[in-house]
Image (cartoon, rainbow, N blue to C red):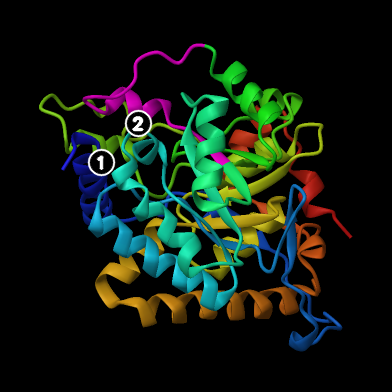
């Protein structure tokens, strides 16, 4: 097994061991109840748009793994089957290992094999070239391509990258040379509005905020180090703040909320803050590993059902209407946004 493949397996093992932090900021968000919603559960429409992609629901299984041989292939097969059975979008983990070692391609291709007509996102790091992006897309017939930003993870990773120059230019070249939407995704440390504005300017279709509060890749990489680097263990921008930051910029760009999302209420709050969809990763992986495939499928179904109940209680028939429901922002999230000049009042006085 290659060192890269071994690293993939170590990441899974440490992710399961550390679990989720529940520091995503959603406890600072309260949705305002509507006693007269004038709506039936049967009328709820969960379909949404991310860029020009139409998704059957705002829930997606976010990027996790691949490139770790038979073990990661089995995980990706199960996740893809669950996505197919529940009709939700799914993303693969970074495909760079399969580009550098073709023997790892089956652990990614399995997703399209078992989910022939589903929405699947490819995934590469920001070091990728346009040619590599095209290979990744073709490998799984991807409907979109995630480019992940993981500066902190790379810095803490013993064998990680140390040079992050010209990343924006590389992403722009990929946007210009591929035929599918490009989604830029943070990996657990959140997104600010200044970066979001730059990504919007170069034509990125969507931003997956990957906020602080879920899987902590600083802590994961520290488990692989001899000399521990604690500086980044509590570093980042919460998921709730990240969504509000990105939404505050001018520009036509979709937002995907991710980072510690575990239930329908987290999902609803993401959308109410302005996201068009929300990605779940570590929570579903842990559920599958510990309880099996049926439990994974049932949980996805339950989240979607619970979301319809929440939307009904709020009088929001569609995802677009859920994006406009009033809410109150408290605590650290309120303080952060006000200090950053982002008006929280606009969320509370919606009609």
Query: Residue 330 in the image: x percent, y percent?
Result: 61, 49
Taking the spot 51% from the left edge, 52% from the top edge, the residue there is 140
Magenta range is 146-165
Mark 2 element type: helix
Left or right of 327 in this view: 145: left
Question: Which quarter of the rendering shows the N terminus?
Answer: top left
- Nearer the observer, 143 or 209: 143
Taking the spot 13% from the left edge, 24% from the top edge, the residue there is 227
Is there any visible trace of residue 238 in the rendered image?
no
- Nearer the observer, 196 or 132: 132
Using a 10 Å C-alpha cutoff, classify the residue at mark 1 as few (fewer than 14 neighbours), some (14 to 19) or many (20 or more).
many
Query: Residue 204 in the image: x percent, y percent?
Result: 69, 33
Q: Do the residues labelled 1 and 2 touch (CB within 8 Å)?
A: yes
Left or right of 349 in this view: 341: left
Using a 10 Å C-alpha cutoff, classify the residue at mark 2 as few (fewer than 14 neighbours), some (14 to 19) or many (20 or more).
many
Residue that badge 1 annotates: 220
Membership of 159 in magenta stretch:
yes
Mark 1 element type: helix
Which numbered tag is attached to residue 153?
Answer: 2
- Nearer the observer, 158 or 283: 158
Taking the spot 76% from the left edge, 64% from the top edge, the residue there is 319
């Amino acid at each position: 097994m290659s060192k890269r493949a071994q690293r993939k397996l170590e990441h899974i093992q440490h992710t399961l061991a550390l679990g989720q932090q529940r520091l995503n900021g959603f406890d600072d968000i309260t949705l305002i109840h509507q006693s007269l919603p004038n709506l039936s559960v049967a009328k709820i429409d969960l379909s949404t748009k991310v860029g020009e992609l139409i998704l059957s629901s705002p829930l997606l299984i976010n990027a996790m793994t691949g490139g770790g041989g038979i073990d990661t292939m089995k995980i990706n097969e199960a996740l893809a089957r669950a996505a197919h059975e529940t009709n939700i979008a799914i993303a693969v983990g970074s495909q760079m290992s399969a580009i550098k070692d073709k023997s790892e391609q089956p652990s990614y291709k399995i997703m399209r094999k078992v989910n022939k007509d589903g929405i699947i996102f490819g995934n590469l790091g920001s070091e990728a070239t346009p040619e590599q992006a095209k290979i990744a897309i073709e490998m799984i017939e991807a409907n979109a391509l995630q480019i992940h930003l993981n500066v902190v993870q790379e810095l803490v990773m013993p064998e990680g990258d140390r040079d992050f120059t010209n990343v924006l230019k590389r992403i722009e070249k990929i946007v210009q040379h591929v035929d599918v939407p490009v989604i830029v995704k943070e990996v657990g440390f959140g997104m600010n509005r200044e970066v979001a504005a730059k990504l919007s300017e170069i034509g990125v279709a969507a931003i997956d905020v990957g906020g602080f509060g879920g899987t902590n890749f600083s802590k994961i990489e520290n488990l692989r180090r001899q000399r521990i680097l604690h500086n980044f263990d509590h570093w980042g921008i919460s998921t709730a703040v990240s969504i509000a930051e990105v939404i505050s910029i001018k520009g036509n760009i979709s937002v995907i909320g991710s980072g510690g999302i575990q239930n329908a209420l987290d999902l609803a709050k993401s959308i109410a803050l302005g996201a068009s969809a929300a990605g779940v990763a570590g929570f579903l992986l842990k559920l599958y590993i510990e309880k099996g495939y049926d439990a994974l499928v049932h949980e996805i179904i339950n989240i979607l059902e619970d979301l319809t109940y929440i939307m009904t209680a709020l009088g929001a028939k569609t995802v677009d209407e859920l994006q406009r429901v009033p809410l109150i922002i408290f605590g650290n999230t309120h303080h952060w946004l006000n200090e950053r000049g982002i008006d929280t009042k606009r969320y509370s006085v919606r009609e």
